[in-house]
Image (spheres, rainbow, N blue to C red):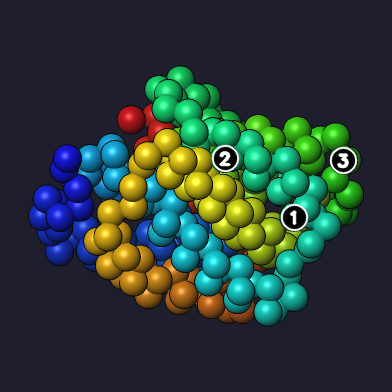
Amino acid sequence: MMNLYDISWPGLFLFLLPVVAFLYAGVGHGGASGYLTLMALWSFPVIVMKPTALVLNLFVAAVSFILYARKGHFNLRLFLSFAVASVPMSFLGGMIEVDAGLYKKILALFLVFAILRMLSVFGKDSRDIRAVPIAQGLAVGAAIGFFSGLIGIGGGIILSPLILLMRWGAMKEAAAVSAAFIWVNSASGLAGHLSRGVNIDPQAWLLVAIALVGGALGAFMGSSRFSNVLLTRMLAAVLAIAAFKLLIT
């Protein structure tokens, strides 16, 4: 079976990996969709792509969460509104091997809508924050969790814009909650993949070390140095990259 040891890593790949981690961690994301994009461009075997992306997610999202939480941006109640249902559904999604091509196209269209909304194309966001209805939180968490496990991401790329669009939290609060959400979903989804015999390639840990360099810097800058306006633009850019990737794959 082909694994990471069979892949020749050009300098450009190793350069882009921490850059992707920096951009995603800056807005509280783990970066799985970006890592999957890079691995696809360099023809990584599918058998190692999902578990490798989820392992990278675990470490980068953890660093992002710690730095955002230390700044007081984490809202436990908001996190639990989605995580309670997402964790078991992420495990279930990770156990299923299915073609998610159609889902990726639908998700890309949703991301385009989210980008336009955050850029005030559909009007300005309200500053009024409201509580998450229990039923909506459970439904959103379950849906995101399932598809996160299915395609090998943490789900923050979907949850962040939803929190903002539904006025469930502010920008940095959404980033902190998303980081924690990504971590638990990545762990659960990875467990689902491992339960059906998928293995983590040993050389994935080298990629973790490289990605952590960019992820730690991005999380530090995002949690304490970047303004909310800059974070909004960064998140819109990240969503645009993810949408483009989903449309062409």
Hey, what amino acid is under mark 2?
Phe
Closer to the observer: label 2 or label 3?
2
Hey, what amino acid is under mark 3?
Ile
Hey, what amino acid is under mark 1?
Phe
Q: Is residue 226 above or below residue 174?
A: below
Q: Residue at x 61, y 74 (%)?
A: 66
Q: Residue at x 42, y 27 (%)?
A: 97
Looking at this view, is 199 or 108 the one in front? 199
Distance (Cα) linking label 2 and label 3:
21 Å
Can residue 244 be seen here? The reply is: no
Callout 1: SS: helix
Q: Which residue is mark 2?
A: 91
Looking at this view, is 78 or 118 the one in front? 78
Q: Which residue is mark 1?
A: 79
Callout 3: SS: helix
Tag shown at residue 134: 3
